[in-house]
Image: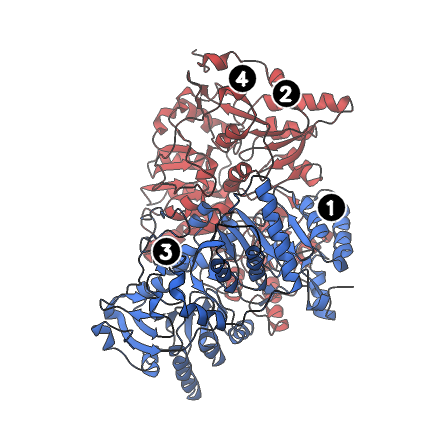
Chain colours: A red, B blue
Amino acid sequence: MMSRITCSELSQKITTAAAAAAEIKDGDRVAMSGFTGSGYPKVVPGAIADRARCAHDRGEDFAVELWTGASTAPELDGVLAEVGAVSKRLPFQSDPAMRRSINAGDTEYVDTHLSHSAQQAWFGFYGKLDVAVVEVAAILPNGLLVPGSSVGNSKTWLDLADRVILEVNSWHPRAYEGFHDVYYGTRRPPERLPIQLLEPMQRIGDPYLRVDRKKVVAVVETTAPDRNLPFKPADEDSKAIASHLVDFLRYEIDAGRLPKELLPLQSGVGNVANAVMANLADSEFAGLTAYTEVIQDGMLDLIDNGKLKSVSATALSLSAERAADFNENIEAYKGRILLRTQEMSNHPEAIRRLGVIAVNGMVEADIYGNVNSTHVMGSSIINGIGGSGDFARNAYLNFFVTNSLAKGGAISSIVPFASHVDHTEHDTQILVTEQGLADLRGLSPLARAQRIIDNCAHPDYRELLQDYLDRAIVANPAGRHTPHLLSEALSWHARYQETGSMRD
Amino acid sequence: MMSRITCSELSQKITTAAAAAAEIKDGDRVAMSGFTGSGYPKVVPGAIADRARCAHDRGEDFAVELWTGASTAPELDGVLAEVGAVSKRLPFQSDPAMRRSINAGDTEYVDTHLSHSAQQAWFGFYGKLDVAVVEVAAILPNGLLVPGSSVGNSKTWLDLADRVILEVNSWHPRAYEGFHDVYYGTRRPPERLPIQLLEPMQRIGDPYLRVDRKKVVAVVETTAPDRNLPFKPADEDSKAIASHLVDFLRYEIDAGRLPKELLPLQSGVGNVANAVMANLADSEFAGLTAYTEVIQDGMLDLIDNGKLKSVSATALSLSAERAADFNENIEAYKGRILLRTQEMSNHPEAIRRLGVIAVNGMVEADIYGNVNSTHVMGSSIINGIGGSGDFARNAYLNFFVTNSLAKGGAISSIVPFASHVDHTEHDTQILVTEQGLADLRGLSPLARAQRIIDNCAHPDYRELLQDYLDRAIVANPAGRHTPHLLSEALSWHARYQETGSMRD
């Protein structure tokens, strides 16, 4: 097999993960590649965790700030969180051990719009970056880097870091070359220029990541697969949500508000997103495009059956089977998939210009359309806002989807008052549960409330919500724009905490 | 005096306000010009109100949907609200009578990001537009329209409406010609193109509004002044806020995160905004620019003393004295002030590219940095979100400012839980009260809470806030990302409603 490292200068820096990890010191800011379990370094994080464990055993401090593209995997977030080696984490995570560390107050978590993370790091808002650890598929003779299954923030981390560690992972097909578009036209204000992107598949950058070879302190070879979470087939509720949503798209086409090939789709991660893709796959739609963050199994299916012409994203996030299949048949996807920096995949300028149709999950919505995407009962973080704000705010249409019930009916996803707000009433357009769809465009809060209760709430909670609304209207003769009973507004959540159910 | 109407076809349509108002029917959607009390029609709204009153006296229904640029004046929002003639209002208002009608539940209010209103109307999200009523300074021989003191959404209203009524107001100087830049490159997705704007004063459009002359059903001549609210000199608290803010800008320059001429300024409406301008006027700063919504007295002062090179906005909003002075000396401002459509003044693409420094007022912030800009005690609307979301989300730096106390100390502007959220913790960067400034960039919610309590809260409430936070941390051993006591979170507001004070 050909070596993946064909740059003589960098091949001289090949070493072990342990030796590479020795470059990282307590207190360092360390930025790693990786987005939704793809393209993250597989072995250096574990070696850093080993260093931390040894230091802690000796009674010494050892913790780093950890920046990434988005979520990673047990071999990165997991191992570092488990040894208490992360003092601060940004901009997104979804790892159980990391989540525990954050919710225990041991790790500071800065939960950031994914389009903001690279620029704010560059602006210096997070401090100086010490080390970048970036996984790639290959190093070319001239030192250019071929990314693998994600691009994320790698471009910015390579630019900003004082020292760079490269992991070259031959699990990624060598044929990834040509799948990436790394925009090198970014500037800091006042030097910024328009991003000349007119359609999802347009190339505006380079197929390679650049690195200053002098900054590279170690190159480590690996062969480990991405996280590759199993793909769950859609359940009945997800199918119902997908069906409401796709019917609504048909309605919008009939009303002349959408072209028949729709507009570029964005779809958040998860079961419902896959169900929407499955519904579209079985539909009359054709000539679709996507401008999204992540490509899941369902989107590959849509490409395979010819309905989806092309997808721009920043990462793949596949099941193990689908990833193996993709790696084997990768050439079939060339020219139909483009992986960009997350700064571009999530850029407000691009999303608004292209007129993206955004579909994102939520934890709960209140009756006025304020959406909580991140917290359980106001206090505990689940994952983070990710790109949902970038897409929802700038989309042509945005959908927020969830089951109407959680915890076997003990929790209603439609509540009087959201226990945390990630998307405000000014931003949310269309809410969907398995019960139905509430189109909130052009409605006042009070009109929205009635539509959400009628269309989205589960029947078990509908009367309770109506009762809250009716009494709030009566109690606020001069506050009927968004009538609330503040002493009761969060009582459903408090009741759940006390009794294990939101119901009386 | 030369007539302002030099188009023979349109001069034949000159008529009275009453005759023009007869073109408007019950149930019509009527879109009017006007932004922050500038450039709104002065007489047709009153004539519509007369029609409504007569209809109501006869026992007939008469109400319209009313769309504008932003806030108007008693002669528009006021007269129509007072006779109950507005069924729905969007996208912004600040009129006492209109506010009462909304909070009484008599008028539906759709409180919209100001950059979203034109495009969403065009997309058809608000229904078909029947009539546009637009004030201009002059009509050229070829039918092109010279706007006056605001542009707002007039371009879109003229494009979309079936019928058009023009008010030609000779109070506006004829020399307004050349002060406007009306972008006619807007498209609906997927046809949109990059907005090729590189610096605040760059022209990318036409100096005139276009109208299809066949759609014009009436032209009405007026001479009435804009609203022209009196300018209040800055009080001590506003001066303290401005001083913290300007000192912080110096700090950012010293840290290498801002150029010494800063980046384009955006400043919300009000006393603090003017105080910031006054502070800059007395400072070492020079070569400043602004990319903002509204030009108030303070910004004109900054132009006059040479510190501010140029301002892009969508409207003037001056005191009567300053407006008289401006109208007299308007030629001195040519090339230094450009009035754009609000779609462009507030466009995410432009704001992010230019790297705007955004300063906006707020009602309250919670300890985690969620900001309420719109509601009193969760239920009653004050004005609306306006452009604060457009600017805050896309700014290079954003500041939210308020006094730490309201109602003589009965209300703390820093609370455990915001009673309404317009800007989430993911968006807010820097909070400022007269007590001090909290830089929240790169902090976790818990770290933000401590900084906000320490730096921004009034001493009278600091211990209460600290006590809430401390107990919330203890009560949430697995929820220390954003620890809350949900049964207490809104108790400060509920207590104020019951006892007239947030204090125990």
Which corner quadrant of the image does residue B155 belong to? bottom left
Q: Which residue is mark 2?
A: A47
Q: Which residue is mark 4?
A: A219
Tell me the CA gap for discs 2 and 1: 33 Å
Tell me the CA gap for discs 4 and 3: 54 Å
Asked which secondary structure carries label 2, the reply is helix
Q: Left or right of A202: which side holds A6?
A: right
Asked which secondary structure carries label 3, the reply is helix
Quadrant (top left/top right/bottom left/bottom right) for the N terminus of chain A: top left
| Chain of the residue displaying label 1 | B
Closer to us: mark 3 or mark 2?
A: 2
- Same subunit, labels 3 and 1: the answer reads no
Closer to us: mark 4 or mark 2?
A: 4
Mark 1 is on which residue type?
A: Asn
- Same subunit, labels 1 and 4: the answer reads no
Neighbour class for label 1 at 10 Å: few (<14), some, many (≥20)?
Answer: some
Mark 4 is on which residue type?
A: Val
Tell me the CA gap for discs 3 and 1: 45 Å
Q: Which mark is residue B476?
A: 1
Q: Residue furthest bottom?
A: B58
Q: Which residue is mark 3?
A: A251
- Same subunit, labels 4 and 3: the answer reads yes
Q: Is residue A355 at all visible to an observer of this figure?
A: no
Asked which secondary structure carries label 1, the reply is loop
| Residue A18 spot, x, y in % from top left | 63, 16
Neighbour class for label 2 at 10 Å: few (<14), some, many (≥20)?
Answer: many
Mark 3 is on which residue type?
A: Tyr
| Residue A360 spot, x, y in % from top left | 49, 46
Quadrant (top left/top right/bottom left/bottom right) for the C terminus of chain A: bottom right
